[in-house]
Image (cartoon, rainbow, N blue to C red):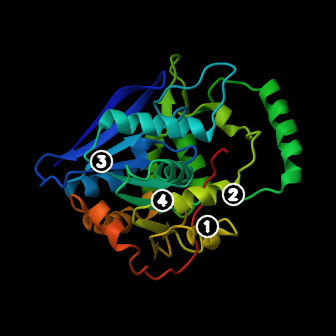
Amino acid sequence: MVRRSSDTWKVNGLELCVHRFRDEGARPTGLTLLLLHGFLDAGSTWDLVAEPLARSGHDVVAPDLRGFGRSARVGAGCYYYFPDYIADVAALVDGLAPARLGVVGHSMGGAVAVYYAGACPERVERLALLEGMGPPASAPELAVTRMETWLRAMKGLERAPRRLSSMQDALARLVANHPRVPREVLATRAPLLTREEPDGGLAWAYDPVHRTTSPLMFQVDAFKAFLERIACPTLVVSGGPHGWHPPDEAERAARLPRAEHVELPEAGHMMHWSAAEELAERLGEFFGRGSAGAGSAERERGPGKAGERDGEGGAARGRE
């Protein structure tokens, strides 16, 4: 039986909520899987995928990134940038000190995973990117407009949480935003994505600052450089035609030295909710190929034959 726990870790001066999934009755693989969630999501909503992976013997860890879920928010005058998330991941990995590490990143979490695996290729044995190939590129001339938009937003920013009238209100909004996810699944997500306020009211469990447009442009050429630095086998998972894909996603994915591709054609972008069983099966097979010392041995052999690529790749509504 899978045992779930949630602990607070002090990371870079902030308290992050870290969810852990373990099956004490399963034969340990020795592999720690770090699951990184997407924009306006939380680590706790990986449960539908995390539990099957834990039953396979993996130690599964899913943090709420800073400003999301139950993790702390940055203080007044601060903001959220990708380097912050990456530094948090690096510190968390140092604290976990896993003998072997696999990383799964969805959407914005996929971009964080790319930056981390590219900067620390020796730490990651296997990597899975679930529509996590970065946000769309922007024309340089939009940089001024983005900065102007950000300055206006920050000037009038209200840090009070976005209130909801009830849990049914939260569910109705999730249904409207995620029409491909069964309503009964979303009903189990709503309590994980909301929190009770001190006065008894209900609010979304993310910092409203995340709703602002970042002043910084996504640097696609720099992102490609990180992709090229990733040394481990990488599984690129698409949610099919209803997923979310940057126009140049195929070119980005081609920069991965050792990529294979899988499509879940009916899943859409929120595949860890809409197609959790199939996704867990695909991830379980991919991470099950690893063994102690496999990362270095496979790197010596060089790239293997990539799987069939049917459909398009990643998405991430993250900040750069």
Question: Can you say whether 273 is above or below 157 in the image?
Answer: below
Local SS, label 2? helix
Location of mark 1 (residue): 252
Question: Can you say whether 167 is above or below 23 in the image?
Answer: above
* 13 on left or right of 82: left
Residue at the (53%, 16%) spot, across then down: 199
Amino acid found under the numbered disc labelled 4: Ile
Residue density around tag 3, few if under 14, some if 14–19, many if 20 or more, within 10 Å:
many
Whether residue 131 can be seen here? no
Residue 98 image position (x, y, % from top left): 28, 43
Q: Name the mark on residue 230.
A: 4
Q: Nearer the viewer, residue 145 or 255?
A: 255
Location of mark 2 (residue): 220
Residue at the (63%, 51%) spot, across then down: 317
Amino acid found under the numbered disc labelled 2: Val
Residue 102 image position (x, y, % from top left): 35, 54
Amino acid found under the numbered disc labelled 1: Arg
Residue 166 image position (x, y, % from top left): 54, 35
Local SS, label 1? helix
Which mark is nearer the camera, 2 or 3?
2
Estimate the spatial distance between the alpha carbons at disc 2 and disc 4, rounded to whole Å. Answer: 16 Å
Question: Can you say whether 17 is above or below 126 in the image?
Answer: above
Estimate the spatial distance between the alpha carbons at disc 1 and disc 4, rounded to whole Å. Answer: 13 Å
Q: Name the mark on residue 60.
A: 3
